Amino acid sequence: MRKLLLLSIVLIFSLVLSATTIQFWHAMGGWRIDFLQSQADAFMKLHPDIKVEVQYTGSYRDTLNKMIAGVQAGTAPHVVQVFEIGTQMMIDGEVAIPIEEMMEADPSFDIGKFMPQVLNYYRVNGKLYSMPFNSSNAIVFYNKMLFEKAGLDPNDPPTTFESFIDVARKLTVKDASGNVEQAGFTVSLNSWFFEQLMAAQDAPLINQNNGRTGRPTAAVFNTPEGLAIFEWWNAMSQEGTMINTKFEDWTAARNLFISQKAAMLMTSTSDVALMMESAETNGFELGSVFLPRPADSKAGGAIIGGGSLWLIDGHPDAETKAAWEFIKFMAGTEQQIEWHKATGYFPVRKDSVEKLVASGYYGDYPDHLTALLQLLLSVQSYNTNGAITGAFPEIRTVVTTAIEKMIAGEMTPAQALKYAEDGATRAIVDYNEANY
């Protein structure tokens, strides 16, 4: 018995010594840190010869900057989660091994099981560069109880800009002094929503078919579609029926909705699980609906948001192979189901969705289905596939700045839209000049 115990210890020790170690950097904060660690732990149980060191590296922007610094210092991770708008920067930086190359060398991998709507974003010039992982789009949640209180049909939420303005007015409650006690609508100041609302109208952000058929040289969103969004946003802001939280302050917007100080919230589908739990805790019924668009606009769809997993080049072959196994695991059928249920990010795989449908999951959790249907019913075009440019972070900053100036009364919607497009074009030109 003692010899058997000693032998087991020796075997375990030898496995630890011979294990291939890889690093995984991600941008998922809060409780998701522990969830991703649990996923890595599950992977290591299946692959005892691979050790995964998981590290939360801050926001998407922080993670991308740290990865770039790591490449320069020779300390880059093996797998890194990068937000969707970092795609062109990663391609131009030539620091990653395109996922398609790994797939072609691995006959066990079937890309046909993945959602084409998701793949269409990350496939550039016919090649898939990264593995879709945490995919989302924007959605509107609403408080059915507050709808009923305002005399509105809780099963008939607004779907157009025009009806949204009208409903937000009816949901807004002010005191005798005119101070807003309950707003009709809230959102975090983030140009991601502008991008999503443009795609909902099947309208482009930049030239060269959103950068999909050639390197873009200019922004092209100073259009009737773009103006409609700015005017819609401004109308509710000036009336006091909409509360704008600070730049990328998702938490503040969520808290306004959860505390029932705002009746509607535009946010990411990744918040579905949190919203369902919060509604139950705070005693109200949750509703969800697709993004609105102008009544007379062209029908478009939702752009993929969130992030994907990149395989960083420059590591020994054994480590690269181990990292590929980990990436496949994280994008696996069961892992995507667990991730979807725990967060609200929709599954990137068709077989995951099929299993969920067969189990009756969406009958019990219809708000998860809203987000998925919005994606599945999206028109697939260059506009809904999303824009591709290395200047995207700067574009988001200038568009958000323009919205801030507009709601502060410093610019009209038309002036703010022109300011945003001019700044976005400068960002694209500067990026091109610095990199080509």
Image (cartoon, rainbow, N blue to C red):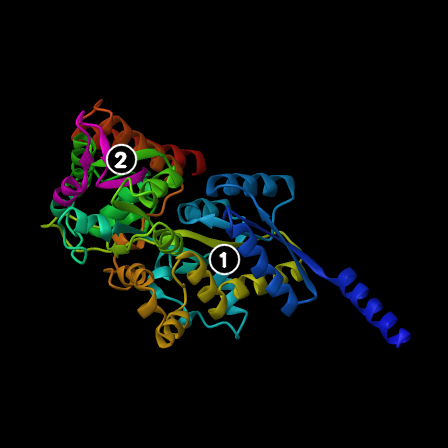
Q: Tag 2: residue type?
A: Ile
- Depth-wise, is mark 2 or mark 1 nearer the camera? 2
For the residue pair 392 and 6, the one nearer the viewer reads as 6
Q: Position of residue 225 (x, y in %)?
A: 17, 43
Q: Position of residue 118 (x, y in %)?
A: 36, 60
Asked whether, in this view, residue 162 is left or right of residue 391, the answer is left
Q: Which residue is mark 2?
A: 243
The crowd level at tag 2 (other Cα within 10 Å; few <14, some 14-19, many 20+) is many
Q: Which residue is mark 1?
A: 98
> Element type at marker 2?
strand
Q: Quadrant of residue 354?
A: bottom left
**Residue 408, placed above or below residue 60:** above
- Whether residue 6 can be seen here: yes
Q: Residue furthest left?
A: 296
User: How many circles with numbers are drawn on the protein?
Assistant: 2
For the record, the magenta segment spans: 165-188
The answer to which of marks 2 and 1 sits earlier in the sequence is 1
What quarter of the picture does the N terminus occupy?
A: bottom right
Q: Tag 1: residue type?
A: Pro
Asked whether, in this view, residue 60 is left or right of residue 231, the answer is right
- Give the residue displayed 65% in from the left and 44% down from the top: 75
For the residue pair 373 and 392, the one nearer the viewer reads as 373
**Residue 301, placed above or below residue 238:** below
Asked whether, in this view, residue 18 is left or right of residue 411, the answer is right
- Report, in whole angstroms, how far the alpha carbon at label 2 lies from the one at label 1: 42 Å
Can you tell which mark lies on residue 179?
none
Residue 150 is a magenta residue: no
> Element type at marker 1?
loop
Q: Position of residue 315 (x, y in %)?
A: 64, 53
